[in-house]
Image: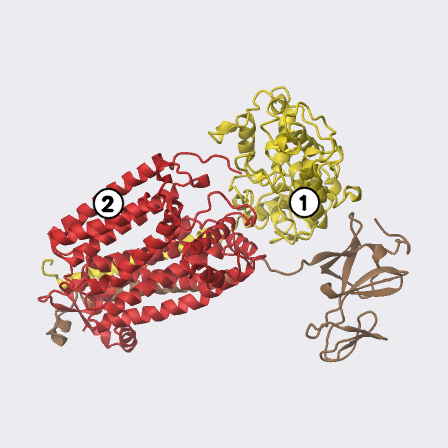
Amino acid sequence: MSAERDLPTDARRLRIGLLLAACALLTVMVLAAVRALRPGFVEIQARFAGQVGEAAAGVRQVQSCRGELDRCTTCHLGVEREDLRAAGLPPPFGPHPERLGHHQRAHVEIGCSACHGGVGRALNSDDAHVNAATGERDPLMREPHIQAACARCHLPGEVPGTERLLHGARLYAELGCAVCHPLGREGLGGADYGPDLRTIGRKSLGYLRDSLIDPSANFAGSTMPAFDRSFEDHPEALADLLVYLESLPLEPAPGCRLRERNAGLLAAPCASCHAGTAGNAAGRFRHGCVWIRERRDALRCGRCHPGTVPDPGPDKGFCPRIQQERKACSACHDAAR
Amino acid sequence: MAEEHDRQPAEQVGDADGPSRRDFLVGSGRAVLCACALGAAAGSLRLAIPRVQDGPPARFPVGRPGDFQMRTLTWLRERDLFVLRDEGGFGAMSARCTHLGCTVRRTADGFYCPCHGARFGLAGELVSGPAREPLPWYRLSLEPDGKLWVDRREEVSAGTRSLGEIEAGEAGG
Amino acid sequence: MSREADEPHLRMRRNFVFHVHPLRVSEHALNPWLTLGLGILTGVLFFLLCASGALLMIYYIPSTERAYDSMLDIQHAVAFGPFVRALHRWSAHGMVACVGLHLVRVAACAAYRGRTLNWFIGLALLASTLGLAYTGYLLPWDQRAYWAVTVSANLLDHFPWLGAPLKELFLGGERVGQAALIRFYTLHVFVLPVVLLALLGLHLWRIRKDGGLAGRPADDRLLPAWPHLLLREAILVLCALAVAGLFAALVDAPLGGRPDLHHPSNPDKAPWFFLWVQEMVSYSAPVGGVAFPSLAVLLLVVWPFADRGERATGRWLGAPRSRWLLGAVVLSAAAAFASLEWAYLAGEGCAGSHPDLLNPASGMLVLAAVAAAAAGWVDRSRRTALLAALGVTLVAVVGCILVGLCRGPDWIFYWPWEDWPLVG
């Protein structure tokens, strides 16, 4: 097959090759070791120690009521330290910007990632500040978007500090979003409905904004009307609606009874159409959208209001569907049974 | 090479280099491979050493002051801890025997470890048995959330009471 | 033998190695282009998988409630955790690829002639490897793993008679849950590795019994295995380790979000080595899910019995004439697949009347039969016919994997540079 092989030369080449291959392997192992043995927090803790003059604390972790581990305070060492407020420390080290109000000991009881998102178990900046579902960088929610996180345990408006979330929820009802995107069991998307939005909060904020302003930006065949003009004069309303959309992952939260009670309400159409001032389902159903009025026949109205419906008005009694869905409301409202 | 040809004339085995250079090649190759193997073993060991340990945190809430009746001793089963309350205030004492870690039992005159018979007094002081140390007491504090918190990392002297200012009927927080 | 062989510790080492290789080997065994070292590569990757898998087992918890959290810890808090996890993931994908290519190599070199038993051991090894890769895919318990396994387990529903009971056996229930996770875990860390190791021993023993690398030319001279063969293999092993390590150090294994058991991601895709089945099932369940895979397996099973030609020649694809013929078959199959796929994607509704007949998968099945008959007749050789059928099948499989990778939400085709739209 080949020319006569010179065996001694071959053996020497092989020995050199073996040595080179072994060296290559060793180099790779050193590379892997260098990358693996330098967790980000060690460096950050050393910087903190240098600035404050305290010994490095090692890994610190908090177990939330949901049983989740949160290690953010390993790097955010000054979050609970009111005594450092005057020191003006740079970002990862200073105390929490505002008093935590409802959750004064949030950093000990529920951890940071419960509200701010990110990967609470991570031990370096790059891994921690990522939305685990989308892989997006720096998801850390700040005002007003952090109000979306309140919905993991609370109803909109239930606790102080969720005003914009509540406004967003009411806009969702008043603008008639729920007509095409009901948040209940039937909202699975399909020919009759728009896409299921029950987990839409997992998408990025930019994606949500694009989908509202110009639905065809993300989905070429969208039949949803564009809302590019609607919010021109009301940027705050747009932001509030986005806060509500961000609050819609509706993940089950084992351990928090509060959350379990509210999950049914949030998912039930009662609350999404009849959102009252307190975030419960006490309000009246109303939507003033011209587009919906024009298409009343084509939309779901016909299911409860059969025939040609000139204007059913707000209070025409209960349709069977609403009657059925009210079961979810009865979790709290005894009268609704 | 000559040597090898002498020994193995029938086989065309040999090396273009003399034995010394070949030995160097083989030796250093072997050394690098050993370094690789050692590195892999060391890395595997390092992986097995946890950076973060599982288990309950050293600092934890035990409840509101109102949860503890005056002149009672409460055994917190999950925490291996006694919380006592009397006129002097609150105290937190370990329920873990200092001998080999069994959970001690309350007796009329103190505490008794069922495993090897160690006896402790009412304040955890050593009475008899194989244990060498008294039961440790931990720091207890009232935090802004209205709950009593115990910190296992901070030991205090036996019999320490704190928060005596809280009235008996006060729920606290 | 060289002087080194006289040293006692070397003799011992040699004795172990020489259970696999004889003291003296044929010179053609040194030709790297004959085997491409695929068998050795597979072995190296299997060793890496065992080592990294054992390390991962220290931290992994096979419980639906804690599995994902333990993955997060491995990924973020364990020293060397991401490296070992990436090593395990990429070695697994590499091993599936190497085993597949090894099979193609053996078929193309006719190395199975006179070695029918080892051919079947090899097929069993392929099955175990796929089983390991598949069971391992569920263990991270992230959104991707959960739904990929849900989807691919439901492929079993399309198999007549055996499908439903098999699915229940593997999942321990209707849905993927705790029962399925612990079953997959047991299969992955114990049952399948033991089976694979036993088969691997048999495989190597049969190679030695059957006279080493197949297709030795009659006039080939014998060389001492040390150093000429063994050092070559050692260099290959070290290079494979280095490449796998480099890859693992540079590219992290992906970890999706926490699984959402009520909202599948859209699309849910099976891992690439099963993606072709999923793609074909999207054309037609009876053809893509049952007929095509069954016929492919049948081809591999009858292969060593069908070919009664000359023994292995130590050349790929036999005579130059056969090579040209098979090259033409593969090229035209690729062109045919591209046109079939284009026609199918362009005319969404055209297959409406006979979806089971008019689709790329059944088209490629017909083409495989035609190509086998034509190539066999032209070359007057059953081996060429078999290779033609295998070539067309491989083109269909690879093509379907590529198309499957391009599938977006609702299983609609998008070019890689196109963005996927919003879906509910």
Q: Which residue is identified by label 1?
A: A263
Mark 1 belongs to chain:
A
Q: Position of residue C250 (x, y in %)?
A: 41, 48
Q: What residue appears at the point 71 percent right and 40 percent down from the top-left corner?
A: A323
Label 1 element class: helix
Question: Residue C97: which quarter of the image?
Answer: bottom left
Picture colour for chain B: brown
| Relative to A270, C238 lies left or right | left
* Res C333 label: 2
- Reply above or below: C158 against C346: below
Mark 2 belongs to chain:
C
Picture colour for chain A: yellow
| Relative to C219, C161 lies left or right | right
Q: Is the Cβ of the residue at disc 2 closer than 8 Å to that at disc 1?
A: no
Q: Residue furthest front?
A: A307
* Res A201 label: none
Q: Tell me, what colour scheme is on the image?
A: by chain
Task: Decide if residue A33 is in sight here.
Answer: no
From the rendered image, report the letter of the chain displayed in red.
C
